[in-house]
Image (tube, rainbow, N blue to C red):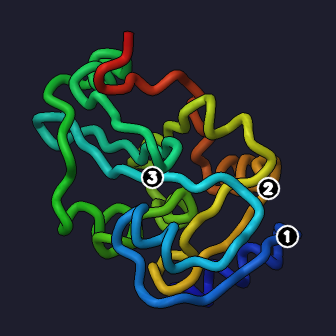
Amino acid sequence: MEQALYRLLDEQGIAYQRVEHPPAYTCEEATRLIPYLPGAECKNLFLCDAKGRRHFLVAVPASASVDIKALGETLGAKGLRFASPERLKKYLGLEPGSVTLLGAFHDAERAVHVVVDETLWANEAILCHPLVNTATLSVSVADLERLLIHSGHSPSILAVPRKNQP
């Protein structure tokens, strides 16, 4: 699936910088393991509502601590929670530790709503796993937006609620 992503990036004229690295399962590991790339580090959450009917791929700055309950209220999704690894595989074709905005291209049925924090989206580029956690790409926000729209996942850009936010 990773090769299909690179073909799509090339077909769409999406420019990127790529580095390989040891597996990074957390933002802290990524910061330690990934050589410098231009762009904002991000944290990606795959969430679903209490009944498992609505799914959300949420991207925030790596240092953000998301208030999932408040985010659920913002999105009108009762009982928002982390989705299971099985749901992650079913909807985005990903394994835990590899969640990425680029996973949206796998969701051909458009069952996942993409949400990006406005402070993350304000950067020139964002760092993303290319569907595996052993490499990282730097992709411009403009190209990410174009790719997400092409995949049928026009992102919702909003102020994602943080824990302990005044």
For badge 1, the amino acid type reads Ala
Give the residue number, with chain letter if any, for mark 2.
140
Which of the two residues, 91 or 14, is positioned nearer the viewer here? Answer: 14
Give the residue number, with chain letter if any, for mark 1.
15
Residue drawn at x 65%, y 52% as measured from the top left:
40
Give the residue number, with chain letter if any, for mark 3.
43
In the displayed structure, does residue 36 sit left or right of residue 120?
right
Instruction: Please report contact status of discs 1 and 2: CB closer than 8 Å, yes or no.
Output: yes
Q: In which quarter of the image is residue 123?
A: top right
Q: Residues within 10 Å of mark 3 (few under 14, many from 20)?
A: many
Which of the two residues, 90 or 71, is positioned nearer the viewer here? Answer: 71
In the displayed structure, does residue 112 sit left or right of residue 14?
left
For badge 2, the amino acid type reads Ser
Where in the figure is residue 134, as x and y percent of width and height? 49, 86
Q: Earlier in the sequence, mark 1 or mark 3?
A: 1
Q: On the rendered image, what quadrant is the C terminus found in?
A: top left
Say what secondary structure mark 2 lies in: strand
* CA gap, disc 2 and disc 3: 17 Å
